Amino acid sequence: MTAAWRIGVDIGGTFTDLAVVSPDARLHVHKVPTVTADPSVGVVHALERAAARERVELRELLRRCAVFVHGSTVATNTVLEGKGARTALLTTDGFRDALEIRRGQRDDPWQHRAPYPPVLVPRFLRRPVRGRIDRAGDEREALELSDVDAALDRVRDEGVEAVAVCLFNSFLNDAHERATVERVRSRFDGAVCASSAVAPVMGEFERTSTTVLNAYVAPRTLAYLHKLQERLASLGLGVPLLLVQSNGGAISIQELGDRPVTLLLSGPASGVGALNHYRRAIGSDDLVSMEIGGTSCDVILMNRGNVAFTDLLDIGGYKCVTPAVDVHTIGAGGGTIAHVDAAGLLQVGPRGAGAQPGPACYGLGGTYATITDAQLLLGRLHSGAYADGAVQIDRDLARAAIERNIATPLGLSVERAASGMIELMDQKLLHAVQRVSSERGHDARRLTLVACGGAGPLHAVAVARALGCALAYVPRLSGAFCALGMLNANVRHDYFRMHLGEVSGDFRRHLQPVFTSMEAHARDTLRREGFDEGRITTRRALDLRYRGQQWDVTVEADDTLDASRIRSSFEAEHGRLFGHVQPDGIIEITKVRVAAIGATDPLPEVRHEHATEPPSPRHRRPVWIDARAGWRDTPVYEGHTLKAGHCIDGPALVDEQTTTLLIGDGDRLTVDPAGNYRIEIGRASA
């Protein structure tokens, strides 16, 4: 690694971020507008900019690259935009409509009139196959391969590009699915996937939905990834392209295989790697990150150094079972559009202006009023170049958009309309952070709010103050938070297997061989990816519940599989989540889990030059601070002039390469030894 470059690329809805670690451990970031029609174009543009800055040829940069990690949003966007493959589903006779019936209940009981999203496989493309595996995993009825042939004959003329196979109880015995997939592949050239390979879990609807999603996104996603890898190879890249999965770990395209569904949270999950990097400088393992870009806000909670995981994702209303970082995402970013609804009320989001045309102030044809327009009008941003020169923003265009869309309909001044947009945005962000903290039993007052993304630091102090946090932390390179996280992400593979039993008696005798087998398979996978034993670790976990409960609680398990320790861990987590335990309750096991981690080299530790003179602002200008402080004549500092040890009492602004920080009235900013910004809420000197 010492003689090579390391590159991480995160494609967002508005910007493509690239982080580069040079052979001498220097760290730089670059931002370019995302090319939505072909995201790989934005990747190449960012690489060209990085090569120019480092004064090397692009081919030489890629030839000497040791690690290239990519966060792909293609799978997610394929689902959200409804642009996936025409998909057929082969399912057990009698379960043809399970996909459309769903669970028969709504996530929000008060939204009883909201329609479900369209079913990804219409009924005429859902074909029944006779054959049955019973609840013990035994064959009750033989598989009828003639039904498979008939189904293929029926859907062949419908332009089907992918086939999903989900047969009843295949998570217990996949013999029928394997035979079905073999027959389909012998007669069909498109993508084929089986539920036993994609999501071998109990729950017919969730398993079917996940398998269908995988088939739906596979042609477009895999084609993009292979095309990008070939393009980078033609430009000189000699190492495999690594992809960030929903679990926050990286994986090679070869090991990804035909399971692109594991990439649905590829970009946001990279925040875990960034949190692990910055927590050393912060000096705390209790963090909540608020990463705000142009389109969305992603929130991740780290509790005592651990990030919560989930198995069930909701992507555009479609359920997906895959191990993933528990990221809460809302449509709230710099490009979020504000509007006045039919009742005459101001609304912010969830629609956004995207990369094209973007906010009105970009001058690219946008006419809607966005949060970035409001920040500019209120003096928090200035006209001119932003985002490392990627865009030029114009205050007059922002004023015209807000006046036309917000101020005039509400009968307000333009400035009051803009401040209302910001106040409403801050409230939405507060609710998003509370969703993963206080609503889940965590005291938000003990957390440090890590504000990141291009837009996050402008909202940091307002959200931290409302939460009761004492400290907000802003990385100097916060605008490329996820791209940096990719370079601090380990390679990770998650495996789980259904195992029904109880935490009692000699349960270890049955579990130990299961864990041993799964760990051996996991280690073989990491060895194929080039890791020696010294860099490989495995973690065990169990999904547990009290008898009679429907939902599971995941707890870690050590090699001893001590029953009393497992019960204690389960009861502690159950009590935190639900407020009660059953001291003598029977604890059932539903799943066995193994996480295999291949350790990569961490990001280099940065030590910033220490200040020898007091900080000096570049200039002053009127800025709307908040509803309490109103407009203030505010000093504006250039981030590159601030050194370790500098202190600034608010109100103030700091312009950085990829973001702008707002320091509130009564707050104090300190530059730490790593060159990042600590904002103590309400701690300004008298």
Image (cartoon, rainbow, N blue to C red):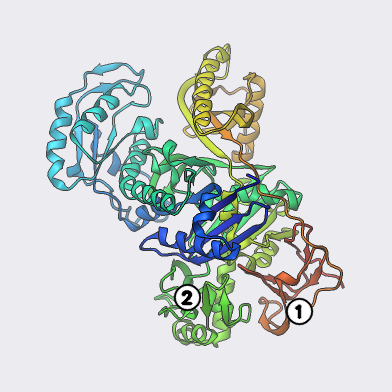
The amino acid on which the numbered mark 1 sits, given as a three-letter code, is: Pro
133 in relation to 317, above or below: above
Q: What element carries label 1?
A: loop
Is 529 or 263 nearer to us in this picture? Answer: 529
Query: Residue 359 shows which numbered tag?
Result: 2
Instruction: Tell me residue 257's x, y (percent).
Output: 39, 37
Indicate left or right for 78 with 461 as reference.
left
Say if residue 97 shows up in the picture: yes
Where's the C terminus, which quadrant? bottom right
Nearest to viewer (mark 1 / mark 2): 1
Q: Which residue is drawn at 66% across and 77% down?
A: 627
Taking the image as shown, residue 681 lies to the left or right of residue 189, namely right
Rendered position, 208 above or below 649: above
Q: Badge 2, how many Cα within 10 Å: few under 14, some, many 20+? A: many
Image quarter where the N terminus lies is top right
Residue closest to the eye, 676 or 20: 20
Which residue is painted at 47% across and 43% down in the image? 240
Task: Identify the residue position indicated by label 1 in the image.
Answer: 617
Q: Disc 1 and disc 2: Cα gap in Å?
A: 28 Å
How crowded pointer 1 is (Cα within 10 Å; few <14, some 14-19, many 20+) is rated as some
Q: Residue 408 carries which label?
A: none
User: Residue 411 appears at what percent x and percent y?
Assistant: 50, 87
Q: Is mark 2 on a helix, strand or loop?
A: loop
Q: In this view, does 509 lie to the left or right of 23?
A: left
Would residue 229 be found to the left or right of residue 392 on screen? left
Nearer-N-terminus badge (1/2): 2
Are discs 1 and 2 less than 8 Å apart at CB? Answer: no
Three-letter residue code for mark 2: Pro
